[in-house]
């Protein structure tokens, strides 16, 4: 038996699955304390667990770490140690960060000698004495986490590894994140990803260990896994080290769940929640990844992220009629108290859908006084916004199948511009939790190779081995791992026949046997 949980801004959804069969589903309002919501949902699921059955694994997707960045809270004092001199001084670390986020995590930066060229040659020898001086200053400043970033470290990570050893020797209590394990080629974006990961480390440790303890107190001894933002899983220890990989896991869970429920491998998924709508493309059953740098909490990063369009529109979105305005405010998890059809005094999109006759929920009489023409305008605008988001995600003008999931999908009709078919799979309201429960474990690695020193096949094999090893460390069964994606991009205008190689490997959870 598998338990899948997805904690959203409005609802916490949970499912109990026996292999591919859905046994029970729960949808509860999200609590301010993420652990409490998970425990409440799991408590209801366990009441449906057959007497002879046991839970083999618990998979959780959460927005907790994303919210911490957006709200600038619970971030550890963090420093950036860049191995670069005499290069890159024009653009120092954190140069493109919002002032309030930089201040929230300390904003300590250090530049020392080191780093590599694109072909692996040293820019300069690693300056070990400067690193020790930097660490001493970090300790005086109260720094608790450090991101180590070397120029072209995805090509040659030796300096980052050596600097990490020095930091741990001088300050064993410091949490260290190295950039070549967090992002792709591109100094600032990769450095930013590592810095965000470092700043989230303490919160990740507290949150994930708290969830594990809560699960144990429910009498469940199953291992905990966290959803990654590429539609795969990682075990709890790996997630503590890489909390940044949980960011945007909600939309990817929904997309994986939509693919599972609808049977489509290639198409568009529209996930309408209580606060927002996420629209993304499925490619071979997995979310299409963004090909460019992605802005996160105002910071440009280049670690893997789903290529989605998010709009502030959901079931709890606030509607003003004079003049007509829809959102971006939302009542969120207070919908069942604040919404007009539930006896509240706030007009929401759900109220408009009830007044329009599209859905029956709450007390329809409480919307009877609404002007029918205004209601129609609200519903038409909701439809238009979603159709525009679909058009932004599509790569061609051809119509494609569109799967609607999420509790808020009741806002939309059965016809959408750009859709060859509109699918509403059974249990679509908990597609996100199903996506978490059925997910596999993945590992992804991107490196730059000089093909003058090795052949193409050797470069791909080396990158594939690294991706497989990363999947194993995240909790995959080695015997089930397969490489599902290989990208090769020659780097133009660069000597040495340089090529960027990206490999993704996926496997089943280790130790589950026939549970799936």
Image (cartoon, rainbow, N blue to C red):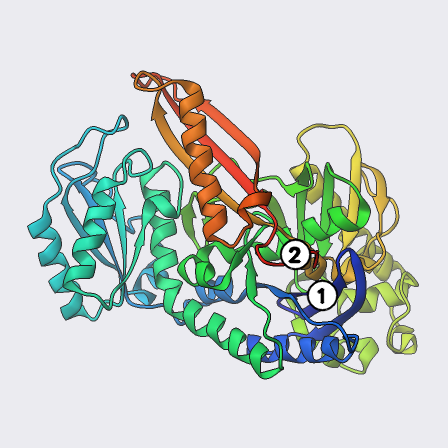
Q: Are marks 1 and 2 in contact (CB under 8 Å)?
A: no
The residue sitting at 78% across, 78% down in the picture is: 51
Does residue 19 appear to the left or right of 333 in the view shown?
Answer: right
Q: Which residue is mark 2?
A: 513
Q: Nearer the viewer, residue 179 or 212?
A: 212
Q: Residue at x 58, y 83 (%)?
A: 217
**Residue ID at (33%, 37%):** 154
The label shown at residue 499 is none
- Let me know if residue 451 appears in the view: yes
Picture coordinates of residue 386, whole percent (x, y): 73, 48
In the rendered view, tell whether residue 177 sits above or below residue 27.
above
Q: Residues within 10 Å of mark 1 (few under 14, many from 20)?
A: many
Task: Tell me: 205 left or right of 425.
Answer: left
User: Regarding mark 2 in the picture, which secondary structure is present there?
Assistant: loop
Can you tell which quarter of the image residue 459 is in?
A: top left
Percent of width and height locating residue 8: 63, 66
In the image, farthest residue toward the left = 129
Q: Which residue is mark 1?
A: 1
Q: CA distance from mark 1 to mark 2?
A: 11 Å
Vertical placement of residue 483 versus 408, above or below: above
Q: Secondary structure at mark 1?
A: loop
Q: Tell me if I can see residue 321 in this picture.
A: no
Task: Choose the circle earlier in sequence order: 1 or 2.
Answer: 1
Where in the figure is residue 141, as x and y percent of width and height? 17, 69
Task: Please identify the quadrant where the C terminus is shown.
Answer: bottom right
Q: Is residue 64 left or right of residue 310?
A: left
Q: Across the whole image, how many numbered discs are drawn on residues?
A: 2
The reply, left or right, for residue 62 in relation to residue 189 is right
Residue 414 at x, y percent in the picture: 88, 48
Tell us which disc is closer to us: 1 or 2.
2
Q: Residue at x 66, y 30 (%)?
A: 395
Q: Considering depth in this image, is 453 or 135 the residue closer to the camera?
A: 453
């Amino acid at each position: 038996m598998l338990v899948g949980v997805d904690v959203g801004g409005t609802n916490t959804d949970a499912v109990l699955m026996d292999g591919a069969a859905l046994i029970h589903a729960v949808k509860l309002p999200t609590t301010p304390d993420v652990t409490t919501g998970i425990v409440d949902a799991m408590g209801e699921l366990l009441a449906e667990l057959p007497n002879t059955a046991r839970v083999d694994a618990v998979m959780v997707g959460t927005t907790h770490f994303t919210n911490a960045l957006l709200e600038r809270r619970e971030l550890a004092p963090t420093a950036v140690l860049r191995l670069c001199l005499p290069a890159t001084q024009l653009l120092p670390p954190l140069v493109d960060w919002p002032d309030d986020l930089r201040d929230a995590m300390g904003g300590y930066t250090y530049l020392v000698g080191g780093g590599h060229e694109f072909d692996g040659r040293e820019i300069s020898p690693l300056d070990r004495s400067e690193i020790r001086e930097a660490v001493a200053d970090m300790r005086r400043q109260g720094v608790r986490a450090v991101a180590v970033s070397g120029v072209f470290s995805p090509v040659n990570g030796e300096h980052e590894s050596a600097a990490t050893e020095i930091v741990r020797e001088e300050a064993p209590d410091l949490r260290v994140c190295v950039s070549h394990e967090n992002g792709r080629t591109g100094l600032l974006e990769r450095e930013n990803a590592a810095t965000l990961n470092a700043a989230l480390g303490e919160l990740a440790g507290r949150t994930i260990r708290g969830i594990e303890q809560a699960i144990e107190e429910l009498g469940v001894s199953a291992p905990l896994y966290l959803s990654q933002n590429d539609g795969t899983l990682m075990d709890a220890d790996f997630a503590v080290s890489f909390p940044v990989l949980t960011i945007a896991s909600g939309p990817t869970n929904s997309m994986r769940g939509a693919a599972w429920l609808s049977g489509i491998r290639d198409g568009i998924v529209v996930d309408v929640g209580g606060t927002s709508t996420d629209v993304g493309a499925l490619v071979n059953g997995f979310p299409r990844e963004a090909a460019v740098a992605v802005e996160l909490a105002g910071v440009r990063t280049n670690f893997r992220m789903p290529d989605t369009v998010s709009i502030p529109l959901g079931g709890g979105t606030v509607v003003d009629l004079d003049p007509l305005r829809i959102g971006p405010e939302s009542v969120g998890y207070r919908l069942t108290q604040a919404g007009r059809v539930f006896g509240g005094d706030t007009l929401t999109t759900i109220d408009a859908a009830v007044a329009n006759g599209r859905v029956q929920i709450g007390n329809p009489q409480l919307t009877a006084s609404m002007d029918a023409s205004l209601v129609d305008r609200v519903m038409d605008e909701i439809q238009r916004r979603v159709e525009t988001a679909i058009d932004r995600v599509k790569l061609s003008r051809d119509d494609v199948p569109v799967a609607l999931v999420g509790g808020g999908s009741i806002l939309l009709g059965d016809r959408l511009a750009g859709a060859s078919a509109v699918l509403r799979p059974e249990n679509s309201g908990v597609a996100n939790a199903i996506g978490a429960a059925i997910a596999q474990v993945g590992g992804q690695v991107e490196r730059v190779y000089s093909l003058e020193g090795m052949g193409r096949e050797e470069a791909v094999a080396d990158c594939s081995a690294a991706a497989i090893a990363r999947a194993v460390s995240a909790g995959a069964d080695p015997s089930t791992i397969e490489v599902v994606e290989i990208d090769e991009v020659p780097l133009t205008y660069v000597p040495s026949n340089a090529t960027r190689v990206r490999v993704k490997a996926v496997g089943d959870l280790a130790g589950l046997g026939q549970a799936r």
